[in-house]
Image (cartoon, helix red, strand yellow):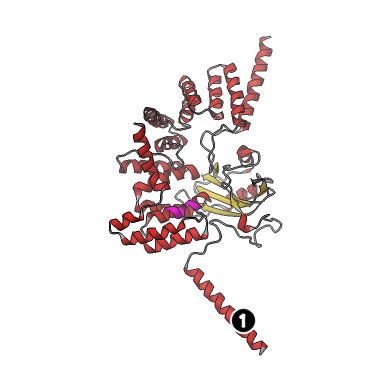
């Protein structure tokens, strides 16, 4: 089962990270695409943002305006520079010419870079309806696309639906021993937000075993507060601070992940906990 | 003789420059990198200086630290939360990106604005929204200084503001 997942993962990734196989176009008699592909390969050694890289791809598109790879490759620099207008025009072309290969990517980017929750859901669901295989992971490998979809549902207020999606996907991931690095954390937060405190504690504990994070201890502390366990809560906050300062926290090279916290959040909670504890001590005396 | 020689050179250079312009209009013109911002003396502060030259300005993520803010992002969020006055208007929806350069001293300059609706089509927001976001961004005095091999670099940074019915709902990245 593990190998199956790995294979699926590699297939899903191959279109993104590997170069297209130009010879395949030749083999199937598509000489135009073969030429466009060979031209596009000249990007090798050039930075995605550079004039040279972009110009080579323009020339590739001139040879074959239906060559999806060239649009996709061109779009990356616009995505990373936050130019959502140009990015969308380019990636739409890639999706138009090869929807099954680019829909999941576009959906993920809509979420990761622009927090376009509804657009991301639409793309991921469209992909799901087109294929009968596993839709695979997000571009950065952090999430299964279904987890990303669930997080988008949460963001538009459909928390119960999000829980259903996350529970189902995590179960599948567990069966394949391939749980994502932050999956339990996000599910735990959803339980906390929907007042399922016991379930939240249980899920945060799983996250601790899988990949301990400052956020995990922070939300666990909030859950313990709800369960009227101030001592456990305070101890979690201290752990959260230590983890945060040790850089064991949610991070992403391009954005701030969902459920991310800041040092200020932890310190504010510690202050509140201290004041509450102090007051209750005064009251009890 | 000298004069006619100069005249020929002048004529030649004019012809050359016309040809170059023609070429540019036929094909898309790229700067060094996608999204590069050239100094425009008409709109940019003249005292803002890039420390290491325009051709060495990096992107915020080039050094792998992710989006960094001086005093963490929560500080920026609080600044906009307390300073931005929402414009109540059902038509004001979409994304606004403000992109700029942060120099080696953590000062920002060359601000540029990009606006679109939620279908990624360019549009123009109410000027009161844009000017507020721009002014608040410009008033942020210090940005994180990013170093490469201990040496402070200049880098491009951007913020994307999500606007729903004139309200500021999210700031990215």
Indicate whether A152 appears above or below A170.
below
User: Magenta span has A151?
Assistant: no
**Residue A211 spot, x, y in % from top left:** 50, 29
Residue A225: image quadrant is top right
Residue appearing at x 46%, y 53% in the figure: A75
Span of residues in magenta: A72-78
Which residue ends up furthest to the top in the rendered image? A285
**Residue A158 spot, x, y in % from top left:** 43, 33
User: Magenta span has A76?
Assistant: yes
Which residue ends up furthest to the left in the rendered image? A28
Observer-nearest of B76 and A56: A56
Image side of residue A23 versus residue B70, left or right? left
- Give the SS element for disc 1: helix
Observer-nearest of A216 and A92: A216
Chain ID at mark 1: B
Which residue ends up furthest to the right in the rendered image? B47
**Residue B146 spot, x, y in % from top left:** 64, 46
What residue sits right under mark 1 in the picture? Answer: B10
């Amino acid at each position: 089962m593990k190998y199956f997942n790995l294979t699926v993962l590699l297939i899903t990734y191959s279109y993104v990270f590997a170069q297209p196989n130009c010879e395949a176009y030749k083999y199937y008699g598509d000489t135009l695409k073969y030429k466009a592909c060979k031209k596009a390969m000249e990007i090798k050694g050039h930075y995605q943002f550079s004039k040279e890289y972009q110009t080579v791809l323009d020339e590739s598109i001139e040879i074959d305006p239906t060559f999806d790879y060239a649009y996709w490759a061109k779009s990356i620099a616009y995505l990373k520079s936050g130019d959502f207008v140009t990015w969308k025009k380019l990636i739409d072309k890639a999706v138009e010419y090869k929807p099954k290969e680019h829909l999941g990517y576009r959906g993920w980017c809509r979420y990761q870079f622009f927090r376009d929750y509804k657009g991301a859901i639409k793309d991921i669901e469209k992909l799901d309806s087109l294929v009968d295989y596993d839709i695979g992971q997000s571009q950065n490998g952090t999430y299964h696309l279904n987890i990303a979809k669930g997080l988008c549902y949460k963001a538009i207020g459909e928390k119960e639906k999000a829980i259903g999606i996350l529970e189902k996907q995590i179960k599948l991931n567990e069966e394949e021993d391939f749980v994502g690095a932050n999956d339990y954390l996000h599910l735990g937060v959803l339980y906390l937000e929907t007042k399922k405190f016991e379930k939240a504690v249980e899920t945060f504990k799983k996250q601790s075993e899988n990949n301990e994070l400052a956020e995990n201890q922070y939300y666990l502390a909030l859950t313990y507060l709800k369960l009227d366990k101030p001592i456990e809560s305070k101890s979690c906050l201290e752990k959260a601070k230590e983890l945060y300062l040790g850089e064991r926290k949610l991070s992403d090279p391009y954005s701030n992940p969902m459920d991310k916290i800041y040092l200020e959040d932890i310190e504010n909670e510690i202050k509140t906990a201290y004041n509450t504890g102090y007051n209750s001590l005064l009251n009890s005396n | 003789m000298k004069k006619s020689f100069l005249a020929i050179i002048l004529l030649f250079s004019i012809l050359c420059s016309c040809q170059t312009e023609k070429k540019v209009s036929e094909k898309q013109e790229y700067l060094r990198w996608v999204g590069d911002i050239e100094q425009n003396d008409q709109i940019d502060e003249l005292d803002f200086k890039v420390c290491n030259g325009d051709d060495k300005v990096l992107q915020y993520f080039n050094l792998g630290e992710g989006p960094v803010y001086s005093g963490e992002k929560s500080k920026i969020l609080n600044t906009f939360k307390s300073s931005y006055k929402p414009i109540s208007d059902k038509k004001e929806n979409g994304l606004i990106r403000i992109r700029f350069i942060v120099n080696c001293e953590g000062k920002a300059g060359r601000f540029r604005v990009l606006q679109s609706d939620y279908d990624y089509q360019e549009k123009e927001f109410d000027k009161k929204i844009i000017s507020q976001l721009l002014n608040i961004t410009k008033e942020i005095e210090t940005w994180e200084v990013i170093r490469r091999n201990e040496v402070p670099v200049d880098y491009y940074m951007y913020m994307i503001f999500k606007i729903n019915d004139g309200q500021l709902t999210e700031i990215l990245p």
